[in-house]
Amino acid sequence: QVQLVESGGGLVQAGGSMRLSCAASGSIRYIRNMGWYRYRQAPGKQRELVASITSNAITDYADSVKGRFTISIDNTKNLVYLQMNSLEPEDTAVYYCNAQGVRTISNYWGQLWGQGTQVTVSS
C-alpha cells in the first residue's frame, strides 16, 4: 500500500514563507512525477495545479506562482517539497500532494492523492 503523507501548512502573514513536504510511503520502486494542487474555497474555483516535478526534475508551475514557489524532489526518499515565498492571501487554500505513475514491486497506481493540508495567508 502506498500513501502520501503531507506536512507543513498553517497560518502565515502575507509576504511570508512556508514549506510543504510530502512523503510517499510504501515499497516504491518508481514515481513518474509528483506535484501539488490546491483548492481555494471561492465560487467557481476548482482544484488547480500549483506545481509539478518529474522524476528527472522537469518542473511546471501555475502562472500565479511562478517566481514565488519552488518545487523540488528527493527521489531517494520519495519526498517532494514546495517552498512558498512571498505568500499572498490569494494563496489561501487546501494544498494536496499528488503522485502519478507510482510503481511498487507488485502494484501500479496511475494517480494518488494526499489528505490535504490547509494553508492560510492573512493580510
Image (tube, rainbow, N blue to C red):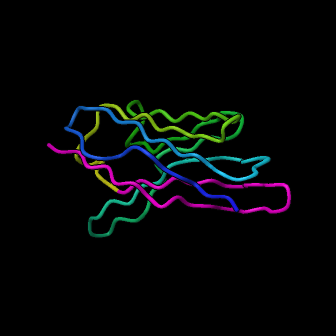
- Along the horizontal axis of the image, is 69 left or right of 75? left
Q: Residue furthest left?
A: 123
Q: Which portion, as a residue range, is magenta?
A: 94-123
> Residue at the location (58% across, 54% down)?
4
- Image coordinates of residue 27 in percent, x first then y, are 76, 51
- Image coordinates of residue 78 in percent, x first then y, are 65, 41
- Image coordinates of residue 79 in percent, x first then y, are 60, 40
Residue 103 part of the magenta-drawn span: yes
- Along the horizontal axis of the image, is 26 left or right of 9? right
How would you classify the magenta stretch by its main secondary structure? strand
Residue 97 part of the magenta-drawn span: yes
> Residue at the location (40% across, 43% down)?
8
- Image coordinates of residue 55 in percent, x first then y, are 70, 39
Quadrant containing the C terminus is top left
State the image quarter where residue 75 is shown. top right
- Along the horizontal axis of the image, is 86 left or right of 78? left
> Residue at the location (20% across, 37% down)?
14
State the image quarter where residue 39 is shown. bottom left
Question: Above or below — where is 47 with respect to 95?
Answer: below
Q: Nearer the viewer, residue 60 or 19?
A: 19
> Residue at the location (27% across, 69% down)?
43
Question: Above or below — where is 73 with respect to 96?
Answer: above
- Along the horizontal axis of the image, is 53 left or right of 122? right
Question: Above or below — where is 100 with respect to 19?
Answer: below
Quadrant containing the N terminus is bottom right
Tag count: 0
Q: Nearer the viewer, residue 101 or 2?
A: 2
Q: Residue furthest right?
A: 106
